Image: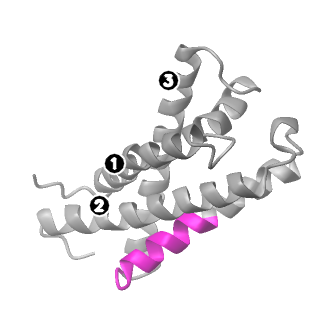
Amino acid sequence: MFIKDRLTRGLLAGLSAGIVTKIYDLLAFHYGISTLRWLDFAGIMIYGRKPVALGEQVFATFGTWFFHALLGIIFVFLIQRVFSSDNLLLKGWFYSISWWFIIYAVFQLFKVPELASIPLKTALSSFVGASIWGLLLALALHWLDRKSNITP
């Protein structure tokens, strides 16, 4: 697979990292490690409440994957134009944690009632999920770059 287009590689890296991280997200919720799933955050943004029906949950999940793909695209262009590709794992992790913090801060600044009080275990679980996503984003991008003979 030769993908020379940086936007496409960023989209694929962000999306694939999001799909894999979804497994952690669902397991953390199922085992009570977290009280919210990423699809709950997306549902609150899309519907103004947590998604209840299966169709709502599926659509909210697609919303999270779209957001992951968008963040992957932004990351790729930042690496190309602003930063180097040295220490890509560290940069991927830091990028994802920065977005984790920004997203939580925005919900608090806008006083979203459904997210007014998030338990520590949920915040920590979300932090771990964001960390996993950022590391997978960097790994996927590195793999796609190598596969396409791209020097970022």
Quarter the C terminus occupies:
bottom left
Left or right, 70 with respect to 103, comes to left
Whether pointer 2 and pointer 1 mark residues with C-beta atoms closer than 8 Å, the reply is: yes
Q: Residue at x 55, y 61 (%)?
A: 128
Mark 2 sits on what residue?
A: 140
Q: CA distance from mark 2 to mark 1?
A: 8 Å
Identify whether 70 is placed above or below 97.
above
The three-letter amino acid code for the residue at tag 3 is Val
Amino acid at dot 1: Ser
Q: How far is disc 3 from disc 2 in space, using C-alphas?
A: 24 Å
Three-letter residue code for mark 2: Ala
Any magenta on residue 90? yes
Q: Residue at x 87, y 46 (%)?
A: 110
Q: Which residue is mark 3?
A: 58
Task: Tell me the chief SS of the magenta region.
Answer: helix
Tell me which segment is drawn in magenta: 85-98
Disc 1: which residue: 16
Who is closer to the viewer here, 73 or 46?
46
Rounded to the nearest whole Å, what is the CA distance between mark 3 and mark 1?
A: 17 Å
Magenta stretch containing residue 28, yes or no?
no
Q: Which residue is pictured at 10% across the width and 52% down the height?
A: 1
